[in-house]
Amino acid sequence: SQTIHQWPATLVQPVGSPLSLECTVEGTSNPNLYWYRQAAGRGLQLLFYSVGIGQISSEVPQNLSASRPQDRQFILSSKKLLLSDSGFYLCAWAGTRGFAEQFFGPGTRLTVL
Amino acid sequence: GQQLNQSPQSMFIQEGEDVSMNCTSSSIFNTWLWYKQDPGEGPVLLIALYKAGELTSNGRLTAQFGITRKDSFLNISASIPSDVGIYFCAGQFGNQFYFGTGTSLTVIP
């Protein structure tokens, strides 16, 4: 069966510090991968998606970037965090049943101080 | 990008009551989905609908793909405390995929 992992689970970082969040998927090949951000009590904002290794599409201009160095690994990064980067970051994958059927990881709670 | 409008935004109901929520769009979709997010966790897919007029159940949950293809409905029968959470609809058309704004459900024991 497929599983998706995210780490760390929680993170507190100072403004201006770098960020690296990691997401890995097991039990499937060539998944579509997604990064979302969710502000407290709000909806899901799609940040990046990837249909293959090295292929990244950005939905929202920002100081974040994403990379996909391996088929089942998706990384979200920033060189300098802003206060507004605080939120709940979710990674998701979709497979052969269509990219609308997405399966989410447990999330990373990021607080920027 | 476009967001789907869900209503109501929040609901407070007594345990045992039935729940109805809906999702509307100005554009048509080929696929409608419903997700549930428990507090502090990632959303989980509940039901996927692929055809206008389709009615699909998953336990106490029933969802319908509106015949206009611009809306979808989710019903929960005989609510229980573990139904608490945020319910998101999602719609897909071609390469476009959007999540709804969410309905927060609180079940009072």
Image (spheres, rainbow, N blue to C red):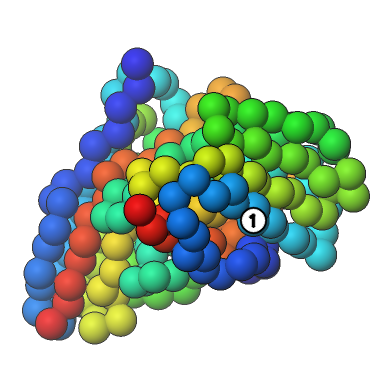
**Residue displayed at 17% across by 47% down:** A7
Viewer-closest of B94 and B25:
B25
Q: Is residue A111 left or right of residue A28?
A: left
Viewer-closest of B96 and B80:
B80
Q: Position of residue A25 (x, y in %)?
A: 31, 30
Quadrant in which the N terminus of chain A appears: top left
Q: Residues within 10 Å of mark 1 (few under 14, many from 20)?
A: many
Q: Position of residue A75 (x, y in %)?
A: 28, 49
Asked if one can make out residue B25 in the rendered structure from this viewpoint, the answer is yes
Viewer-closest of A24 and B22:
B22
Asked if one can make out residue A102 in the rendered structure from this viewpoint, the answer is no
| Vertical placement of residue A64 versus A100, above or below | below
**Residue displayed at 64% across by 29% down:** B57
Quadrant in which the C terminus of chain A appears: bottom left
| Vertical placement of residue B107 versus B32, above or below | below
Which chain does tag 1 point to? B
**Residue displayed at 52% across by 65% down:** B11
| Quadrant housing residue A93 | top left
**Residue displayed at 54% across by 27% down:** B59
Which residue corresponds to mark 1?
Answer: B21
Q: Position of residue A67 (x, y in %)?
A: 33, 49
Amino acid type assigned to the residue bearing label 1 in the image: Met
Q: Is residue A21 left or right of residue A67?
A: left
Q: Position of residue B50 (x, y in %)?
A: 74, 32
Count the labels in the image: 1
Q: Residue furthest right?
A: B68
Q: Is residue A30 left or right of residue A63?
A: right
Tag 1 secondary structure: strand
